Amino acid sequence: MATSLTNLEFALECNKPVEFLVQELTSELGRRGFGILSNIDVRKIIKQKLGEEMNEYVILDVCSPKHAKQAIDAHKEIGLVLPCKILAYEEKGITRVSLYKPTSAVDLLKFEDLYPLAEEVENILKSAIEAVVSSK
């Protein structure tokens, strides 16, 4: 089921544990030419730095070198919104996975010429998220 608070994100919910969802998403993205540049375990950082507990909360920095190179060649400033962000967190027993839409990022920077590339990337990422969320 798609849920979204704004038109800036694409989000789905499922019952999979965050850690398992992130592992599946990492594999699925790899099959589609995307890699995880960083996997930020915010819960672990908060525990280490503040000694406080919180639910699972993971930020993934996702990149396709081919697509990133095309975008950077067109506009060096695109690096302000690269790599793509995918968020996975658990709240009240539900896991939410959310993508900051690349089309929203290029709109923000007013790089209209990059919209087709951003749309292509967005469709690939959305498809990967949908595949992982809907798999058993």
Image: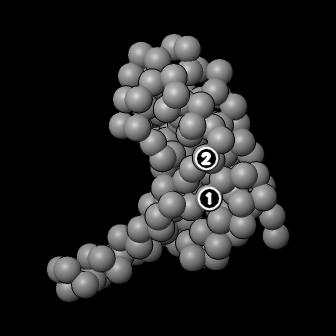
Q: From where the camera sits, is residue 3 visible?
A: no
Residue at the spot of label 2 = 65
Task: Tell which of 92 and 100 is nearer to you.
Answer: 100
Which scheme is used to colour this image of the protein? one colour
Residue 52 as seen in the image, left or right of residue 58? left
- Amino acid type indicated by mark 1: Gly
User: x and y percent of residue 69 in the render?
Assistant: 57, 37
Mark 2 touching mark 1, by CB under 8 A?
Answer: yes
Task: Tell which of 33 and 131 is nearer to you.
Answer: 33
Task: Tell which of 113 and 43 is nearer to you.
Answer: 113
- Amino acid type indicated by mark 2: Pro
Q: Residues within 10 Å of mark 2 (few under 14, many from 20)?
A: few
Residue at the spot of label 1 = 35
- Quarter occupied by residue 52: bottom left
SS label for mark 2: helix
At 20% from the left edge and 80% from the top edge, which residue is drawn? 49
Task: Tell which of 3 and 28 is nearer to you.
Answer: 28
Please tell me whether residue 37 is drawn above or below residue 101 in the rendered image.
below
Label ID, residue 120: none
The number of numbered badges drawn on the structure is 2
Residue 66 as seen in the image, left or right of residue 5? right
